[in-house]
Amino acid sequence: MALKSLLLSLLTVPALAAPQLGGGVLPIPLSCPTPSNIKFNDTKLPNPFAFDTGAPVRTIADWACRREQISSLIQGYEAGTLPPKPAHVSATFTKNGTQAVLNITAGTNTKRISFAPTITFPNTTAPKGGFPLVIAYGGPSIPIPDGVAVMNYDNSGMAEQNDQSSRGVGLFFDLYGQNATASSMTAWVWGVSRIIDALESTRNVNINTQKIAVTGCSRNGKGALMAGAFEDRIALTIPQESGSGGDTCWRLSKFEQDSGSVVQEAVEIVQENVWFSTNFDNYVHNISLLPYDHHLLAAMVAPRPMISYENTDFVWLSPLSGFGCMTAAHTVWEALGVEERHGFVQVGGHEHCAFPSNLTDGLFAFFDKFLLGKQADTNIFTTNDVFNGTTWVPQDWITWKTPKLGLL
Ligand code: MCU
């Protein structure tokens, strides 16, 4: 590279880029150490606004670095390593009426895998820039407004999730090897990233890659949250009834369990499936050693928009933990001056993964504002407080004061 272009590329490192909403990244400071393991021990929720060293997070640039630290810690303790974009990603796109297939091939020069998510397009003329898209893990179980394309992502084909025997099974592991540390959920994130690579680089697809949402329910809701957290080209994250390992916190679920509710705890979930790396087994009996909890996984989505849904009819989903954990995460959107971009809704009275019709207006407000370019009120943060005899006492868990990091 010529010296001049080298200097120019150094001058345009992300540190100088303006933060954007969707399709953009926060400016990461040049010096930002990101160990994947640190000395830590706290029964309360870890402070989003303290670096690994304990130093305070004061600015938006500080948050960008803190987010990188959280990403590294979550990969180190529970998610395994998320590989970067491989050398080869290509796709072909075929469309018949409203139905299309994006056939993606990804890998190295010697080893490649292929997968083919389907897209259902609206039967209308595309807006300038293409249609917004929802990537639905295993197909959608929320209503989708008119004008939004829907992709059916077979995440279980990318990485199986039947039981313990699914460890290392699926397309991702065909490429990276059975001993890759990535959990199934991490493998799914990798797949989402390759889908977006393919959408960005394939002609005539007519999807607006600045307007991509991700959703999934239950185990796939845990996965949808992971995708929103780790892939910052996702513009809107909608986990539905993700429960333990999703929008709940390990520490709060333990508290619920210790208080007499039968919820899914870390110790149980690692026995059930391969949603976490094998390294997480070493911490499930000592979760106070985790220098993060899932409020920080959710906070990785900030400042991008997210709304999560929970169902109090199923104690297993850890209702207090969901509300408490998202209340703690919310402080990060507040600190960034964009609290209306983070919603939470927790009700009962419906089957698992059935979406109550009286919640559609609120969900569509998020679609309208963040995918369809319309005005809408997205200040939605509610619970029915059905916590089975346990009580959410914020000051028992949230020890930090929420700073003002500056307005985005
Ligand atoms: C809420 O997600 C999971 C839960 O973690 C599991 O314990 C249970 O077996 O399955 C739920 C699910 O994915 O239901 C479809």
Image (cartoon, rainbow, N blue to C red):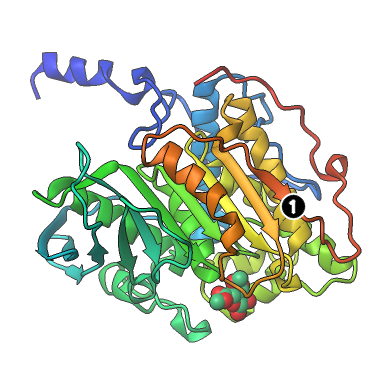
Q: Tell me what residue is drawn at x 54 percent, y 49 percent.
A: 361
Q: What residue type is labelled 1?
A: Thr
- Residue 46 higher or lower than 53, as above or below: below
Residue position for label 1: 383
Look at the numbered disc 1 and give the secondary structure of its residue: strand
Position of 383 with respect to 78 (left or right) is right
x 33%, y 37%: residue? 23
Q: Can residue 192 be seen in this view?
A: yes
Residue 121, image quadrant: bottom left
Q: In the rendering, at what x and y percent does residue 124 appear?
A: 21, 52
Residue 76 location in percent, x, y? 53, 54
Could you tell me which residue is drawn at 16 percent across and 68 percent down?
Answer: 111
In the rendered image, the quadrant that contains the N terminus is top left
Camera-nearest residue between 278 and 295 = 295
For residue 314, side relative to residue 395 (left or right) = left
Q: Position of residue 197 (x, y in %)?
A: 22, 50
